[in-house]
Amino acid sequence: MIRRLTALTATIGLAVAGLTAIAAPTATAAGTCSAYIPSRVSIGQPYRGITIRAGSNCQSAQMDWAAWEAYHPTQGYQTSVLFDYPSFSDTWDLYSWDAPLGRWQWRPAGAYDANSNEIYQYGPYYTDVRLSSYGRVTATRSGSRVVVRTAAARYWGAGEKFVGWAYARGQIQYRTPGTSTWRGLKDVYSNSSGTYSYTYPTSAARYYRVVLYDAANKTIWGSTSPQVYR
């Protein structure tokens, strides 16, 4: 970019001096350049440094620099990544208190080789940014009955911590020892504190887990709890 401005200044100087400037040939495309931008991101901590890498085609095109800018559909420009030779990676600094949830669009923002030839950029790319969640399950036995209790939590960006996920939906699942197949046992709909309880009769020893679904409003990613044996 600096080289192009310098060339333009020199041309203007020649014109002012009464000399005829010979126009430079139009820059031609010098290959292609892409970026490896994640399609989904979970916010589950105050800060995440996400490494964004350039595609191998950028180096093949002798990239000098290339950039993509991220936009939120309602809150506009958010950040950008810049690959500046000899670096073919950059860090996306993501702060939980300052990252709007939703589908971000990464737009090409310019790419050139060392001779100021424009390089074709792939894009736009899209990243679905949502809050993280986690589930827990406990199982206790009383005679021929088993009580399965679940707890759902989701990240609170402004408070920088996990809190109970109210009215989370999911499913309690079980697996018989010696098998790998999980089967649905009971649909989950947590209360205002994120907990749920289910009691049923069985004498069998089983593994249990809870699978939490993505939030219907697309703001929280679902998750699967560790298993317990009872």
Image (cartoon, helix red, strand yellow):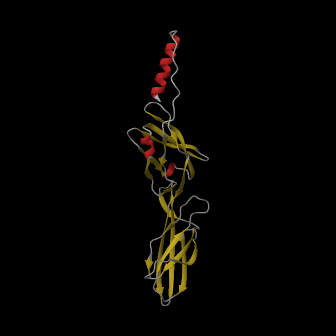
- Vertical order, 175 against 213 (above or below): below
Is 2 or 57 nearer to us in this picture? 57
Residue 34 visible somewhere in the drawing: yes
- Is 10 displayed left or right of 168 in the figure? left
Q: At 51% across and 25% down in the image, what residue appears?
A: 25
At which x and y percent is residue 229?
43, 80
Can you say whether 69 is above or below 227 in the image? above
Q: Is residue 91 visible?
A: no
User: Residue 87: image x %, image y %?
Assistant: 39, 41
Q: Residue at x 50, y 21 (%)?
A: 8
As rendered, which of 224 and 117 lies closer to the eye? 117
Q: Residue at x 55, y 85 (%)?
A: 200
Image location (x, y in percent) of residue 163: 50, 63
Q: Quadrant of the C terminus?
A: bottom left
Q: Is residue 52 above or below residue 229?
A: above
Going by the picture, which residue comes out furthest to the top? 18
Outermost residue, left side: 86
Q: Nearer the viewer, residue 219 or 152?
A: 219
Q: Count all numbered tags in the image, as a single digit.
A: 0
Residue 104 or residue 153, whichever sits in front: 104
Q: Position of residue 166 (x, y in %)?
A: 57, 66
